[in-house]
């Protein structure tokens, strides 16, 4: 599968970095942008490296990240 989109709910993200840690392809990084709660949020850095494994999604304690895959025909 190829990745269609990576959605990050910035209003929920606490910037804990677990998604960054578990990503085997260095797709995500911590940004300098803060959400309304004052946390620096995660951002997509290299979407082209994403293989759609969803380890970031599975390890987010706040369910702030969602990977939407596109099926190959």
Image (cartoon, rainbow, N blue to C red):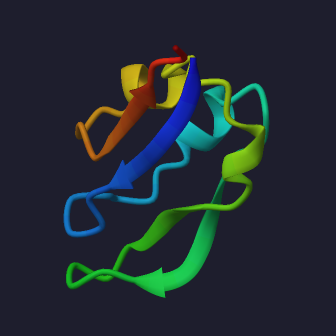
- Of residue 9 and residue 60, the one placed in the foreground of this image is 9
On screen, residue 21 versus residue 34, left or right, reads right
Return the x and y of residue 59 as percentages of the image width and height: 42, 24
Quadrant of the image for the N terminus? top right
Q: Residue at x 30, y 32 (%)?
A: 61
- Of residue 72 and residue 57, the one placed in the foreground of this image is 72
Eyeballing the image, is 49 above or below 32?
above
Q: Residue furthest front?
A: 73
Q: Residue at x 59, y 75 (%)?
A: 31
Return the x and y of residue 54 as percentages of the image width and height: 48, 22
Q: Residue at x 54, y 17 (%)?
A: 72
On screen, residue 14 versus residue 49, left or right, reads left
Q: Residue at x 45, y 59 (%)?
A: 15
On screen, residue 71 versus residue 36, left or right, reads right
Return the x and y of residue 2 as percentages of the image width and height: 60, 27
- Of residue 37 and residue 12, the one placed in the foreground of this image is 12
Return the x and y of residue 24 as percentages of the image width and height: 76, 25
């Amino acid at each position: 599968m190829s990745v269609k989109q990576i959605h990050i709910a910035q209003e929920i993200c606490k910037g804990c970095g677990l998604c960054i840690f578990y990503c085997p392809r260095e797709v995500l990084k911590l940004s300098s942008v803060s959400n309304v709660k004052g946390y620096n949020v995660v951002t997509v850095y290299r979407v082209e490296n994403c293989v759609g494994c969803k380890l970031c999604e599975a390890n987010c304690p706040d369910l702030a990240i969602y990977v939407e895959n596109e099926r190959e025909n």
